Amino acid sequence: MNLIFKRSAPFLALLGLALGGCQPDLNDDPKSSAGQADFSRYVSVGNSLTAGISDGGLYREGQLNSYPNILAQQFKQVGGGEFVQPLFSEAQLNGSGYLRLAGFTATGGPITANVTTNLGVRGAVPTRTNPLPRPQPIYTKDLNVINNLGVSGIRMSDITTAGLGNVSQTGGTATAPTTIFNEYFERITPDGSNETYLERVRRTVDTVKPTFFTSWLGNNDVLGFATAGGAGSSLTPIATFTANNNQVLDALTAGGAKGVVATIPDVTTIPFFTTVGPSFKATLAANNVPGIVTMTGAAPGGPASGNRRQIATVDIRDAAGAGRQLFTLTSAPFLGLLGRPTGAPWRSFVPRANLAGYLTAYGVDTLQAFGATAGNPIPSAFILDDTEQAQVQTAITAFNAALVSAANTRNLAIFDVNTFFRSIATNGLVANTTTNTAAYISGNIFSLDGVHPTPRGYALIANEIIKVINAKYGSSLPGVDASAYRGVLFPQ
């Protein structure tokens, strides 16, 4: 998964979630064995979840607490070897920058701030032919020997794209930079190389000769579309997804390695989509405004003008799952503008230089009340409507069927992430007597971006993968004490 959004504050009041379920302490078993697997050379393939993204960014602490690194430490108890990650140096420990919790408003809403010092990932790319200087020093160890190939933002559809890590390969403009370039792949790609991610996986297989792997690709083929309210990247065609997944798994298993294939979770169950609904319902009711939104699908009741439709409180998904429409976490700071002319207050959220482009993109009129008139509706990017949710579910079902089929064909273990995340959203999870839920901030599992896990969340994921490995390969790997890993870091 990957989430790039404007880090604005305040957000909204915290929500709770009913608790159920239990994850037993796996550290009590003193007997460990590899079973039928060989963990001596472990390689992980994936996106931001594999890299250790948290709080909307990649930084050293997140890398050290990535689920592959946690797994690698447990593998060492049964013969696992060194696990090399492209770690940020201490001088660049904040990596891409990330969100931190700075405090709370008088009503209990979280206030976030951006960490912008000691960075090590390229920021804006004005043009592909004249980019800003590459951050130095970048990852400086042997690029041929990296065990964690997690690249934030990469989609299954991207793995055969040449030049993904080469900022100078093609053109682009300051206002419309190319979407091909990936600054995280650049960190593990030689300067000037047009190598594809698939070629990088094959090179790693040739160099490291893995005996075991985990593969968790495909989240972004759904998530990018969903988090942009259907207005961002398109959903990957199933044929492309299937073919590329087969190529990755063929490369990873070429030398006889065993491994785990992870499926794609239902993204609509994560805090990014479940947090704003209740607050938005309350805002609509308090302001007594109709709630005009830009949608691809029809909302029940009310007039429509083009694809702008009136939405009532009953239409909005709440914490109990009632209602159809989902509002994104990024819409939270704008809810205070509901029903008010936005000429002045909008500029406190959108830089003046970008305001005209923003208004053009969404067709809004700052002289009319925001979200209360057809002329100035709530942008489509802030809502995942019923039609888009159906598209997301169809894609997830098809992608997961392809992943499971490919894994079964190669006799690999399967981590059903979809079932696991749904269980957390419905019942929560107890680990070593510690309560964990899918609630934003207070639930311990999800970080401030509402998409990626906290260190606690990654530890829980690692334990679930260990269960799958033990069941498939007859191993006796111990899990970790997830309660020893932190949730959201509160201000001191």
Image: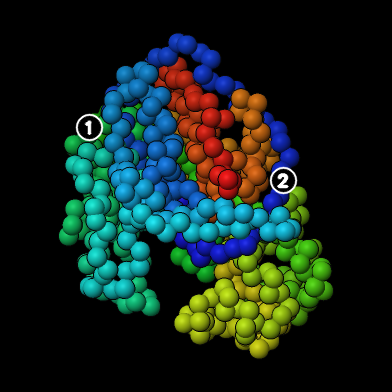
Quick one: 447 or 203, which is closer to the camera?
A: 447
Disc 2 on helix, strand or loop? loop
The first of marks 1 and 2 along the sequence is 2
Q: Residue at x 19, y 53 (%)?
A: 190
Q: Residue at x 42, y 56 (%)?
A: 97
Residue 229 in the image: above or below residue 51: below
The disc at residue 209 is: 1
Q: Position of residue 58 (x, y in %)?
A: 41, 50
Q: Position of residue 422 (x, y in %)?
A: 62, 42
Q: Are marks 1 and 2 in contact (CB under 8 Å)?
A: no
Which kind of residue does numbered mark 1 sit on? Lys
Which kind of residue does numbered mark 2 sit on? Gly
Residue 80 in the image: above or below residue 385: above
Measured in 3D between alpha carbons, the distance from the residue under mark 1 to the one under mark 2, in whole angstroms, is 46 Å
For label 2, the residue is 16
Residue 64 is left or right of residue 387, and the answer is: left
Q: Residues within 10 Å of mark 2 (few under 14, many from 20)?
A: some
Q: Does residue 461 appear in the picture of this structure? A: no
Instruction: Name the quadrant containing residue 421.
Output: top right
Between circles 1 and 2, the one closer to the viewer is 2
Q: Position of residue 149 (x, y in %)?
A: 32, 44
